[in-house]
Structure formats: C-alpha cells, structure tokens
Amino acid sequence: MNHQDELLAKFTARAAQIGIVGLGYVGLPLAVEFAEAGFTVLGVDVAAEKVAQVNAGRSYIADVADARLADLVAAGRLRATSNYNELRAVDAISICVPTPLRKTGDPDMSYINQAAQSIAQVRRPGMLIVLESTTYPGTTEEIIVPRIAGDDLTLGEDVFIAFSPERIDPGNRDFTVRNTPKVVGGMTAACNQVAQALYAAAVERVVLVSSPTAAEMVKLLENTFRAVNIGLVNEMALMCDKLGIDVWEVIQAAASKPFGYMPFYPGPGLGGHCIPVDPHYLSWKLKTLNYNARFIELASEINTSMPYYVLDKITAALNNQERSVRGSRIVVLGVAYKRDVGDVRESPALDILSLLRQRGADACYHDPHVPQVRLENDFPLRSQPFCNELLRAAHCVVIVTDHSATDWKAVRRYSRLIVDTRHVFPNGDGSHIISL
C-alpha cells in the first residue's frame, strides 16, 4: 500500500494520530473537533501553561467548555506537550500558529518559520502537513514546501502538503469548526485528496480549490471584503454626521432591499485577530509586485481613524455640558474587540482609552470579560465593578463594546451623558445620548 492509500484508509477509519501545532483560539478548538471525531490528537505549544491546562482538562478558550475538554483528556483522545519530537509518531499535522504584523506593516513570519523548522526535524514519509495560519499568498509554497519536502521527499507521493485557512469566529454559537465549510488547497491532486479526507472526517463540508495559493487568497478575500465594507460604512457615518442624517436610519432602510445589498454597521474602529490585520498581508505581497492595493489602504485609513472620531464626539458632548475632556471622569463600557468575548487584540477601545488619558481625562473602564488591560507604555488598567455609582460619578459614559451582560437599563437611567458607538440606544431614546 502506498503512502496516499495508507493515509486515506487511516483517516476513514479514524485510526490516524493528528498533531496540532499551536493551541490558541484556532488550534485548541480544532484539536477538540478532531478528538471528538474519533482521532487521537497531540497538541504542541511552546507555552508550558497552556500545555498544563489542556492536560488538566481546563480550557482557556471561551468557545471550548471545560467539561468538553476534560472528557477528551480523560478518554486519552487529547493531550498536549511542548516537545516537538513527539510529533514523529503522528500521521497529520495542522499548523495553527500566530501571524501578526510587524510595526512596519509587513508580516511577521517568525512563528511559521519556527514551526516549519521544528516539524522538518521530525517529518517522515507518509505525513500530511497543513498550514492553517492566515498569511500572504505563496507562503505554503515558499516556506512550508522547501522545509518539509526538502530534497528527499516527493510531493504527493512521500509527503502531502496543503493550506486550509482557519475560519474561527470567537463567540459565534451558530457556526463552529464542524459546520463551517473548510477550504482546502493542496500542492498536488493527491495532496488535495488526502487533506480532504482528513477534514471531511471532522467537518461537515470541505471545499477544494486548485492550490495552496488560491486557498490563501480565499482567506484574504473574506477578511478584506469585511474590512473594506466596514471602512465604507464608517465613512458613511462620517458623511451622515456632516449632513445631519441618522446613519442608522439610512442603513436600516437600505437593508429592506432584498437583493444587491448587504448591511454593515459603523463602529469605533476595527478590532480582533483577523479583520484589521489580514488585508495587510495581501497589500504587502502586492507591493512586492509593484501594485498598490488602494481599497485596502483607504479602508485601513478610515477604520484606524475612527477612535479619533469617537474622541471628537466625546469632546463635543462634554463641551455642550460646559466641560473639557481634561479632568472629566470618563467610563468606557467594553474593551474587548467584539461582543461577549474577552479578546482585546487590536481593540479600538484601547486606542480610545489611551487618547482620553493623553488629553488629561480620568478614564477608566468596565468589561465583564476583561479584568485588566495594558495601554501605551505598558500602563495597566483594571476593570471597575459595574454599579450605579460608577455611572453616576462619570461625566461621560462611552459605549464601545455592547456586551450582553451589561445592564443597559441602568446605563441609560444613571448616566448623565452617553456617547453610544454601538447603537445600543436608538436616536431619540434620551437627550443625553449621543450616537456615533
């Protein structure tokens, strides 16, 4: 039996051992899904604390319940290690490591490089290697293939390599790893077939594309689509403000059209691990080909300016109360980048807090999911307990993240001035409420 047939048989019978490199918000849910599908899963992470928590059956990812993880660990279906050498025994490896941007705006490929180099030391004939980390088009072919295949393994015969972009949406209860279609692009037709067989064992639908580069582009299109449309609707908010029009009314009416329109909503800026970052991978790659991705650059310019627009709203609202930002007690409600999660990566709330403090405000925050944040110069802030007195004492309350657990009735009743960036309170709900 050749390596391809052997892997296909193992995946079909759930007899394969699966390795997951990187046990973060992508890797841990994927590891759990594979383990629940009947595979034996080995997670690898350089963070000893994560390894210890997984092996103790304690989840640090909100979308993975402790009980769910603990059951798999107790059954011997899932365990974690920091030792890459243990991957020698696995049949397939999914790479789920971070891919941040450097301050210069170019991709930081160090995590992918380190993972690829470590896997290259333990790879053997008959393995499937899949990169899931979001990256620029061409990464799999340029970085993964040379290190993993080398000069001694033939692609599609001895070793199988593919790219399959992660599509994790933290906090989404409707779409999970299992029911979100999985895009797969292999280096060869055999690579595609093998990778499809693996994911089909744990995911309801697999969508094949012709190459890893096409699959990498799929992910960037998805997130660039969102970034550009959010940039468009944020600019609409700015224009409506100048025209004296309620942008929320305009969006609601436009959404009544049953074709040719999809509603997006303005906000205080972009946050999270994907939308503010991923389009820049594409922009950076195209610059190497002497092409300027103008939509991406313009959307980024608009979206990153939104915290300053929010600051202007706060300043104007306080001026109308004959107060200045300096010396005012300002409470920011919500610092996570989206509702009902504890993730603050790229969150515009951090920029808003920093800008307020730079202008002399006594700025604090409340977030039930984020006990502490660090601002510029590593300045720490702790979440303030939510109470009526917190609201009464504030000269202005700024709604940045509309968590479901927040008592919005109390916010409306006890706050003397509210700047609402999430349309929690429709216009006209109170003269002391200022909408975005």
Image (tube, rainbow, N blue to C red):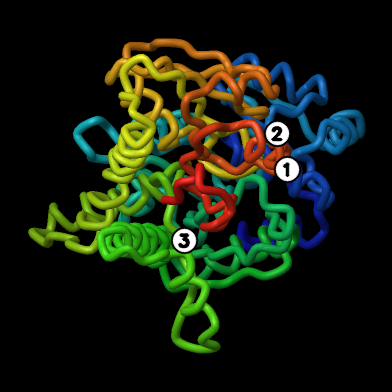
The residue at which mark 1 appears reads as 17
Which residue is at a point 67% across and 58% down the rendered structure image? 198
Residue at left offset 37%, top offset 40%: 147
The kind of secondary structure element at disc 2 is: strand
For the residues bearing labels 2 and 1, Cβ distance under 8 angstroms: yes
Q: Are marks 1 and 3 in contact (CB under 8 Å)?
A: no
Mark 2 or mark 1, which is nearer to you?
2
Which label sits in the foreground, 2 or 3? 3
Residue 217 makes an appearance in the image: no
Q: Report the Cα–Cα distance between label 2 and label 3.
A: 41 Å
Secondary structure of the residue carrying numbered label 3: loop
Disc number at residue 42?
A: 2
Q: In this view, does 398 lie to the left or right of 99?
A: right
Foreground residue among 284 and 386 = 386
Three-letter code for the amino acid on which mark 1 is drawn: Gln
- In primary-sequence order, the first of circles 2 and 3 is 2
Q: Which amino acid does label 2 sit on?
A: Leu
- Left or right relative to 54: residue 312: left
- Sequence-wise, the earlier of marks 1 and 3 is 1
Q: Residue at x 60, y 25 (%)?
A: 391
In this picture, is 364 found above or below 313?
A: above
Helix, strand or loop at disc 1?
strand
Q: Give the label, 1 or 3, closer to the camera.
A: 3
Q: Is residue 110 above or below residue 2?
A: above
Determine which of the numbered discs, if any, sits on residue 265 in the image.
3
Residue 427: x percent and y percent?
Answer: 52, 57
Find residue 342 and report its image quarter: top right
What amino acid is at disc 3?
A: Tyr
Query: Percent position (x, y) of residue 408?
Result: 68, 41
Query: On the rendered structure, is 353 left or right of 172?
Result: left
The one of 254 and 109 positioned closer to us in this rendering: 254
With respect to residue 188, does 380 lie above or below? above
